[in-house]
Structures are given as C-alpha cells and as structure tokens.
C-alpha cells in the first residue's frame, strides 16, 4: 500500500487555492435504456457545451480540458480532445484523457487541480464520461491476426488466404469483463469476498441499498438534483428531455430487495443486483480555476479543494477498500479529522464495499494493522453520509462518478451552509481516492 505524494497539495492550505466554479451532469441512466444511442463523445459534448453556456466563460480563457473514462471507444481514444473539439473550445487548447477505473473522474479532477497549482493553467474543464451501452467489443486475437495478415496481402488471393482456416471460434466476440486481470475476480465477486471477510450480512447490504434508494427518491421529489443536472434530449427525435436518474426506485421495500437472487455467487452469495450499483451511462463536467482568476472574473465558486490523496493496495487483498486508506491520508494533509467533515460522499459500488470501508474507519485493529496508526479514524455519523443517496440508486457511469460525487457534495454543503466535506471512491486495481473540499 502506498500514498501519492502530497507536496503540491500542501500549497492549497497556504495559498493559491483551486476553486470549483461550477459543475453539471447529465442524468445517470441505466445502460441499454434511454441513452443507448448516445456515445461517450456525445454525452461529454452535451455536458461541456452546457457548462460553457451557463458559466458564459470565454472559451479562449480555457487552458486545458481533461476527462476520465474507463471504456474508451477505439475511435475516440483521446476522448477529452474530441469533446473539446466538439464543444467550441479553441483548437489550440490541449486536452487529454485519463483512466483509473472508477476513480477516473476523480483523477481528471485532481489532474486539473495540479495543473492550476503548478502554474501551468488558470482555467481547466475537467470531467468524466461513460457509455457502458456502447462498450467496445473486440474480435478474438486469432481473428485480429488474420485481419492483420490480410491487410498485408498484395492481391485479392493473398488478402483472402489468412481466412481460409477460420473456425467459428475465431469470430466469437471478445467482450470485456468487469474483472480484475491479476486475480480474475469480477468486482461483484470481490464485493462478495469483502462481505464474507467483514461479516456483512445480506440484511445489512439490503438495508443500505434501501437507504440509498429512499434518500435519492426523496431528493428527486424535492427536485434537489435539478441544480446539478441538465435536461438531456435524446435521438432520434430529440423531443422529450430526460431530466431524472432512471435507476432510482421510489416505494422500494426491504422485502423486494430480499427476494432478489445473488448475482455473482449464485449458491451462497449475498450481493444482488439490488445492493450493487447498476451499469449506467452519463457524463459530468466541472469548471476549475485558480481562486485568483475566479475572483477576477467575478465568479462565486461552489467551493475549494482543501486536499486529496490516492491509495493503492494489493488486489489480492480486499479489492475495494481504497477509501479506508486514502481517507486518513487526505485528512492528514488537510490538517482535519473525520469529525470535522460535515458531509461525506462515498461512492457506492456495492453495499458490502461501503459498509466494509465504514467499518474500517471505525476499527482500531484496522488502523494498527493496515495503517500503522494508533487510533481508528473514527465512527462515521451516517446522517452525514450520502444524504441524497448514492451510486446504488443514482447509477454509476464509471468515469463520471468521481465528478458527480464532488458536485453532489458541493451542492449539499451549500444547502446546509456547511464548510467541510469529503468525497471518496474505491476503484478496480485496489485503488482509492479521497478529495476534501471547503466552501469558505
Ligand atoms: C449486479 C449486476 C450484475 C446486475 O446486472 P443485471 O442482472 O443486468 O441487472 P438488472 O438491472 O437487469 O437487474 C436484474 C433484476 O433485478 C431487479 N432489480 C435490480 N435492482 C433492483 C432493485 N433495487 N429493486 C428491485 N429489483 C431490482 C431488476 O428489475 C431485474 O429484474 P428482472 O430480471 O425481473 O427484470 C450489474 O448491475 C453489475 O455488474 N453491477 C456492478 C457493476 C460493477 O462491477 N461496478 C464496478 C464497481 S467497482
């Protein structure tokens, strides 16, 4: 386990803070449904164009565009550049794409922060996108070899020859799995393992999932997400705007959840489609500026970055425990404690993962054995956690979630007139990321 260096972040505490001026997201939509005909590029463009329009920022003032994504299309591998070129940002503005599994959006965000802190940029558009509906499918390696050999052929016979020995198995698609390469376990199987090792019961998992839906559904009724969300019009006729996260279930009961069959370990498992984040499509974008530039341009920022930290643990261990490591590191850098956090947004990949991390925060044993600390980070007050629900109900377009939880947190802090908030995500590869924000 290691922590990334925090040297640059420490500058945040003294001077030159980075402001989050504004942010937006599309609704998060269950994959294969309403957004199935929108690509990542289109989703990213929709949210970026709206961000530029609403903030009325002169695109010439933008110094950089950075987006995170997990499943990039081969045709738009530098997705950020394509979004930038399609959104009216000048062609002379550099743009790059980052990937760090479910922390991709957070990584794009902190790369933007670093670019500003280093003095390289004053204004950066950051964000994240995912269209799981449009996931890339490969041909088998043997078929790709045939295609390659065929491309070298000088005449029609030579071009056709590599395919003479083709079997049915060669043309079977190579579909990407949401699995860890080094262990072969899917994310769901990793969540099962965590539930088992940390003794998180099916009941606890379902109750947490119910909480997520109940809070998100209440927030929808109170129109709370409307500030962070844009109406999204969809092809082919672009008539009916989509303005709600469609995985949120109102009126869900614990009985309905408890009847769902385990999704990953069919025999003994406790992780179901109900207590996991659904596969989703969506995009998020935020406008970052140096505090100085934001003030000079007359913006009233949503908040400021206080600190952040990343962690990495052995994927053979408990894969989705990243927040339990990155959170103490980010709090230390901020000079704050868990108690100081007035609100916490934790990405809900699975109920089992959230509950495992929250238990680790409170565990002296975990602190001693895994963090070499004498005291536990502390008990978390659940009234401060994911107060408008989380990814289990809202959805989880992988690359967009990191930005979404930062945005949701900032608006929640604003509603409560609170100052400090913490946003944390776990990610495949054993990664974790935590960002600490302040409003004043
Ligand atoms: C869990 C998972 C496999 C389920 O996929 P799926 O089977 O396609 O999911 P569906 O949405 O079709 O749900 C399956 C069933 O459960 C039901 N269901 C799902 N969520 C429900 C809920 N909250 N309440 C009641 N029923 C629910 C659906 O209605 C559906 O029922 P049906 O078969 O009668 O139509 C998938 O969402 C997944 O892989 N999630 C995890 C993603 C992941 O790994 N993320 C990375 C994290 S690091």
Image (spheres, rainbow, N blue to C red):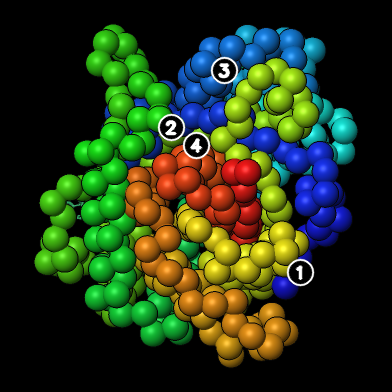
Whether the residue carrying mark 3 lies under 8 Å from ligand 1 is answered with: no
Marks 3 and 1: which is nearer the front?
3
Crowding at label 1, few (<14), some or many (≥20) Cα neighbours within 10 Å? few
Which residue does the image show at 74% across and 15% down from the upper left?
Answer: 61
- Does the CB distance between marks 3 and 1 fall below 8 Å? no
Height in image: 377 above or below 286?
Answer: below
Work out how far the residue at label 1 is from the one at label 4, CA to CA, in angstroms. Answer: 28 Å
Dot label at residue 130: 4
Q: Secondary structure at mark 2?
A: loop
| Residue 222, x across and y down, in percent | 25, 38
Work out how far the residue at label 3 is from the one at label 1, CA to CA, in angstroms. Answer: 38 Å
Q: Earlier in the sequence, mark 1 or mark 4?
A: 1
- Does the CB distance between marks 2 and 1 fall below 8 Å? no
Q: Earlier in the sequence, mark 4 or mark 2?
A: 4
Height in image: 375 above or below 54?
Answer: below
Marks 1 and 4: which is nearer the front?
1
Which residue does the image show at 33% across and 37% down from the upper left?
Answer: 224
Determine whether, in the image, residue 85 is placed left or right of residue 362. right
Q: Secondary structure at mark 1?
A: strand
Q: Is residue 429 visible?
A: no
Q: Is residue 122 visible?
A: yes
In the image, 251 versus 301, the foreground residue is: 301
Work out how far the residue at label 2 is from the one at label 1, CA to CA, in angstroms. Answer: 34 Å
Q: Report the residue marked by disc 3.
A: 55
Work out how far the residue at label 3 is from the one at label 4, CA to CA, in angstroms. Answer: 24 Å
Whether the residue carrying mark 2 lies under 8 Å from ligand 1 is answered with: no
């Amino acid at each position: 386990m290691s922590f990334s260096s925090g040297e640059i972040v420490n500058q945040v505490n003294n001077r030159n803070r980075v402001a989050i001026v504004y942010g937006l997201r599309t609704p998060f939509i269950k994959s294969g449904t309403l957004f199935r005909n929108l690509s990542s590029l289109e989703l990213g463009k929709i949210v970026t164009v709206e961000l530029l329009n609403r903030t009325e920022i002169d695109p010439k003032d933008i110094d950089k565009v950075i987006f995170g994504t997990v499943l990039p299309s081969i045709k738009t591998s530098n997705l950020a550049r394509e979004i930038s070129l399609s959104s009216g940002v000048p062609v002379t503005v550099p743009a790059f794409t980052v990937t760090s599994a479910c922390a991709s959006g957070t990584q794009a965000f902190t790369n933007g922060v670093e670019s500003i802190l280093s003095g390289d940029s004053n204004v950066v558009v950051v964000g994240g996108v995912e269209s799981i509906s449009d996931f890339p499918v490969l041909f088998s390696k043997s078929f790709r070899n045939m295609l390659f050999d065929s491309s070298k052929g000088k005449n029609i016979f030579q071009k056709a020859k590599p395919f003479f020995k083709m079997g049915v198995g060669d043309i079977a698609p190579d579909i990407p799995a949401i699995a860890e390469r080094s262990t072969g376990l899917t994310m769901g199987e990793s969540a099962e393992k965590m539930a088992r090792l940390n003794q998180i019961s099916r009941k606890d998992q379902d109750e947490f999932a119910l909480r997520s839906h109940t809070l998100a559904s209440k927030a929808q009724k109170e129109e709370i997400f409307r500030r962070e969300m844009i109406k999204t019009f969809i092809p082919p006729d672009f008539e009916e705007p989509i303005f709600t996260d469609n995985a949120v279930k109102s009126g869900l009961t614990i009985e309905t959840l408890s009847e769902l069959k385990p999704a990953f370990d069919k025999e003994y498992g406790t992780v179901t489609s109900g207590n996991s984040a659904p596969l989703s499509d969506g995009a998020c974008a935020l406008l970052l500026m140096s505090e100085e530039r934001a003030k000079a341009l007359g913006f009233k920022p949503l908040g400021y970055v206080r600190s952040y930290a990343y962690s990495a643990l052995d994927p053979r261990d408990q894969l989705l425990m990243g927040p339990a490591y990155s959170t103490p590191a980010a709090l230390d850098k901020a000079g704050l404690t868990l108690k100081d956090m007035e609100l916490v947004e934790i990405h809900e990949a699975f109920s089992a993962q959230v509950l495992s991390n929250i238990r680790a925060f409170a565990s002296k044993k975990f602190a001693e054995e895994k963090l070499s600390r004498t005291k536990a980070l502390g008990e978390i007050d659940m009234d401060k956690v994911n107060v408008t629900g989380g990814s289990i109900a809202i959805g989880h377009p992988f690359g967009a979630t990191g930005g979404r939880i930062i945005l949701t947190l900032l608006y929640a802090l604003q509603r409560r007139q609170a100052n400090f908030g913490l946003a944390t995500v776990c990610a495949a590869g054993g990664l974790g990321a935590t960002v600490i924000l302040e409003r004043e």
